[in-house]
């Protein structure tokens, strides 16, 4: 992909990527914009491959999508008194930064309580600067790394990024590169991905490798695969907080209500072995139900909190989890179905962690 592709119209795959970005940023912003009275000093948002703000047809890119979302929440009572928001737009191409400045000024004018910094640096310089800012106490951070290849989030940067507190991130990656050139030293030194052998799963394999690098089982890595022709790209989302994973999964399942994971039939979930449409439940949910049933039977999943966190790690949102728990109740695997949303389990007030099986 050309680094100057912004001069042309975005293709459908790029629009899908931006749709997922928009869905998540609209979920992420109000969580922290409403915490000004809870000791949050600042909100940092980094877009390190920001581009000029739009494509050749005027379709908005990530910077304008972000600023629109912030503008909406600044007008709402619950989020109007936000902590200061600091936005860092970077691109190595000066013409893109110049175009973005003009576009922001024309589209939004003055934005109260928002500080926007523009830089024209190579990513190798921009990333450590972003990390230094994100490490400050009492800040909430979001990084968008919309690269053109695979190098931006190598193993060293990944470990640095995932060590930050209160930091969510979203990275675009050309996963097919690992499928085609996995054994090449220049590729393996970035991220040592072990292929499962199925080309359609290569983005999952990338996500799996990132999970292997984690020091904590409480960190969430969520992939979304995007196919274009014979190539598989995709987004990798990361968060140390279950609510972050929950919100990103909601967007994924809006885009792909079958697996919440791809813009193509990644598991063949809608097809029978004979190629006809199947009237059975999609494979991913069936497999998850079997895993959950086993966990409950072996008493590894005991409460609604256990089930919720297990589902997130399996890429299943709370709405789908609740449907499956009702099925398990009919099958007498559980005796009750308590609330399984984040607010129900972790909200303020009395203890809302409830057993699934009452004898």
Image: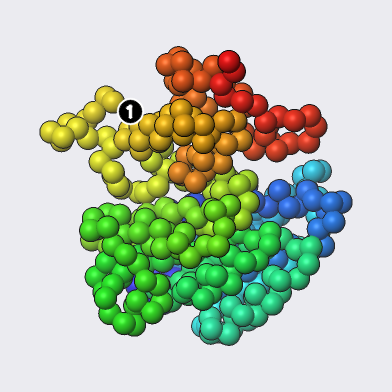
Image point (49%, 17%), residue name: 329
Where residue 278 appears, as percent x and y from the top left, is 24, 28
Number of on-image labels:
1
Q: Secondary structure at mark 1?
A: loop
Residue 274 sits above or below residue 132 on the image: above
Q: Please provide percent x and percent y for residue 114.
A: 76, 65
**Visible in this render: residue 208?**
yes
What percent of the width, then of the height, locates residue 256?
A: 40, 42
Q: Residues within 10 Å of mark 1 (few under 14, many from 20)?
A: few
- Toward which corner of the image does residue 7 lie, by quadrant? bottom left
Kindly tell me whether residue 97 is visible in this rendering: no
Name, please, the residue furthest toward the left: 274
- Position of 270 with respect to 245 (left or right) is left
**Position of the N terminus by quadrant:** bottom left
* Left or right: residue 133 compared with residue 143: right
Quadrant for the C terminus in the image? top right
Among the 4 quarters of the image, the one containing residue 279 = top left
Residue 169, image x, y percentages: 57, 61
The residue under label 1 is: 281
Residue at 50% across, 55% down: 221
Using the image, determine if residue 90 lies above or below residue 332. below
Residue at image location 52% in from the left, 62% down from the top: 214
- Decide which of 256, 240 is in the foreground and name it: 240
- Residue nearest the viewer, comparing 6 with 134: 134
């Amino acid at each position: 992909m050309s680094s100057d592709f912004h001069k042309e119209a975005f293709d459908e795959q790029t629009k899908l990527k931006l749709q997922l970005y928009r869905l998540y940023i609209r979920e992420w912003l109000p969580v922290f914009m409403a915490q000004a009275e809870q000791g949050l000093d600042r909100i940092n948002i980094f877009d390190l491959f920001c581009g000029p703000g739009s494509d050749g047809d005027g379709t908005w890119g990530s910077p304008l999508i972000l600023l629109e979302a912030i503008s909406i929440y600044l007008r709402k009572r619950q989020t109007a008194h936000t902590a200061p928001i600091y936005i860092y737009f970077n691109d190595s191409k000066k013409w893109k930064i110049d175009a973005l400045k003009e576009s922001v000024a024309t589209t939004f004018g003055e934005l109260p309580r928002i500080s926007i910094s523009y830089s024209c640096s190579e990513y190798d310089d921009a990333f450590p600067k972003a990390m230094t800012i994100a490490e400050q106490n009492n800040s909430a951070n979001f990084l968008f790394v919309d690269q053109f290849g695979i190098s931006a989030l190598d193993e060293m940067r990944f470990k640095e990024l995932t060590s930050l507190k209160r930091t969510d991130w979203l990275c675009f990656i050309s996963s097919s590169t690992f499928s085609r050139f996995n054994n090449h030293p220049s590729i393996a030194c970035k991220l040592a991905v072990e292929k499962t052998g199925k080309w359609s799963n290569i983005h999952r394999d990338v996500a799996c490798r990132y999970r292997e690098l984690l020091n904590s089982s409480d960190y969430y890595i969520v992939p979304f695969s995007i196919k274009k022709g014979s190539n598989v790209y995709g987004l990798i989302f990361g968060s140390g907080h279950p609510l972050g994973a929950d919100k990103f999964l909601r967007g994924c399942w809006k885009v792909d209500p079958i697996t919440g994971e791809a813009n193509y039939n990644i598991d063949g979930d809608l097809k029978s072995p004979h190629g006809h449409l199947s009237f059975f439940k999609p494979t991913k949910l069936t497999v998850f139900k079997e895993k959950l049933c086993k966990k409950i039977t072996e008493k590894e999943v005991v409460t609604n909190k256990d089930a919720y966190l297990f589902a997130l790690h399996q890429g299943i949102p709370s709405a789908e989890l609740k449907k499956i728990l009702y099925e398990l109740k009919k099958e007498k695997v559980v005796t009750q179905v308590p609330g399984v949303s984040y607010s129900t389990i972790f909200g303020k007030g009395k203890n809302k962690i409830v057993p699934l099986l009452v004898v």
